[in-house]
Every structure is written in C-alpha cells, then in structure tokens.
Image: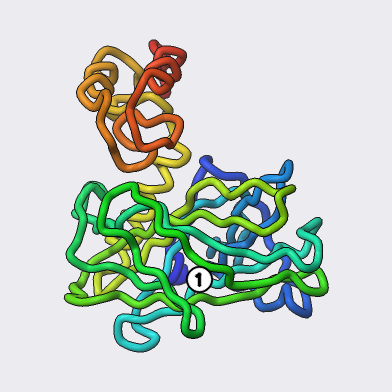
Amino acid sequence: MNDRFPFRFGATAAVACCVVGAGHAGAQHIGDILVEPVNNVITTSGIVAGPGGPEFVSGLRVFMATFGEFPNFTDDPGFDTTGGVGFPNGVIFAFDLLDSLRVWNGVDFDALPPETVRVSKGSTSVTTPLTPNQVAAGFAFGQVGSGFLHEHLRYFLNVPQGAGVYAMQVRLRVTNATYQPSPPFWIVFNQNSTAGSHAAAAAYLQNLVAPACPGDLSGDGVVNTADLAALLGSFGESVLRYSNGDFNGDTVVSTPDLAAFLGRFGSACR
C-alpha cells in the first residue's frame, strides 16, 4: 500500500479498477481529488491504492496528504477532472473552507489545535477560520480548458506546527450557476505522525460521511434507545459535521436529524 493513501475504503463507496489515460488525465495520481458533474452537482472522487494497483472510488470525500515536501508544506492533493463527461471549457473553480482546522486525538476530531492551515496560490491565500463551523471564503484557482482541469493548491501548516494528524473541511464551487457546490469533503494531513494514525483518522471521517450503520451512534450494531440517548444528549448543539447525530450535515443536531434517526430506529446492522 502507498503511505499517501495506505488503506482501501470498503463498502461505503463503489470501487472499480482505474485506468489513467494520456494527456492531462495522465497527471492524475493516487490521492488526487477528481471532480465531475453528477446531476449538476460538483462531485468528488479519488484514486486509491488497492491490492491490484490503483483503484477509482466514486463519491470519495476524504483525501489524505502529508506535510514535508518542504517543512510544514505540501501541494497535494491535486484537483483533476475525471476525463469523462465533464465541465464545459471556461468554467472556473473556487473553494471555501467550512470549519476550523481539527486535530485527531486518537478517537475523533472534536479538538481544535493551536495550528491553522494557510491555503495559497500565487499571492492569494486564505487561512482556516478560528471559529468552529465558520466559513472562510476561498478564491478561484483553476479554469477548465480543452475539457480538463489540473491544479495544485499549496498548503502550509502554521505555527506552532506540532506533530499530529489534522483535518481541513472544504467545499468546491464554480462560476457557472448550472452546477451546485460540492458536498463537504476533507483533506487529512499527516505532520510527523504515524501512518497508522493517519489511516485511522481518515477512516473515522469516512465513516461519518458514509457510516456502515446509519443511526448506530453507540457502535453496538443496532439502532436503539442507547443511540437515541446519545442523539438527545447532543440535541440543539453545534457539532462536527455529520457527527453525534448530525445526519443532514448542517452541523446542528435538530429536528430533521431526529426524524432521520427515528426512520432507522430498530434497525439491526449485523
């Protein structure tokens, strides 16, 4: 397995063998964020390391990167179009940061570190916000030409630059009003931590986005009163997106989440 993406996501995403073509598409590599329009929504996918070689994962929303190309710096992952039915020429891509930087504590990403991440291209930059679930508007970074997009932003970990695994939440948008912004996705950065911690942290976020058993907040394989108690314990609170009963990803545990939970109540997952 590749240390940049050392594990495979399981049944949470459709996986098929990836064939990387020539030209611009040939710049795609493991860990890149592939973008395409699906029902006029910007959708992210990726290429991961599999036992038989690179594999394409449709709908992937957790990506891995490692600081250290220069100290506290990386320009991965890149952004590429898939080479299939894509965006028209001239469409300009931009991004937003949707949350404070988060740090992995071995269990979850609830903690806010003293570090921030600065995202830049040329002289333009934006830094992850200090307030949880606050949006920091990004900037335009790439334009589709000849049917393709291939761009790399630059990511800098700001002081105190401690060792750890950090998660940055992102949304893509384009200038063409035909296409809706992407669902939130995460880039999980490793700063001098172990490959095992990096993989565990990414798997945790992937499970939030596409849980193996939706509604099973306690992890006992059944959606029951223990899970209801956990959800009610967070009711009305602002939480990490998709965690603690936030089923619709709006960062607040509220009535729509309770309704979604009750629709799953009594379901067995094992």
Report crowding for label 1: few under 14, some 14 to 19, many 20 or more residues within 10 A (C-alpha): many
Q: Quadrant of the C terminus?
A: top left
Q: Nearer the viewer, residue 116 or 7?
A: 116
Compared with residue 161, is residue 226 higher up or lower down, i.e. above or below?
above
In which quadrant of the rendered view does residue 114 lie? bottom left
Tell me what residue is drawn at x 24 percent, y 70 percent.
193
Q: Nearer the viewer, residue 129 or 40?
A: 129
Amino acid type, mark 1: Pro
Residue located 80% across and 61% down the image:
88
Residue assigned mark 1? 77
Residue 211 in percent (x, y) is at 43, 36
Q: Residue at x 28, y 49 (%)?
A: 132
Please give left or right for residue 24 compared with residue 201 in the image.
right
Q: In the rendering, at what x and y percent does residue 125 appear?
A: 43, 75
Question: What residue lies at 28% left-to-right and 64% top-to-bottom?
Answer: 165
Looking at the picture, does residue 135 appear above or below residue 73? above
Residue 196 is situated, as x and y percent measured from the top left of the image, at 30, 62
Local SS, label 1: loop
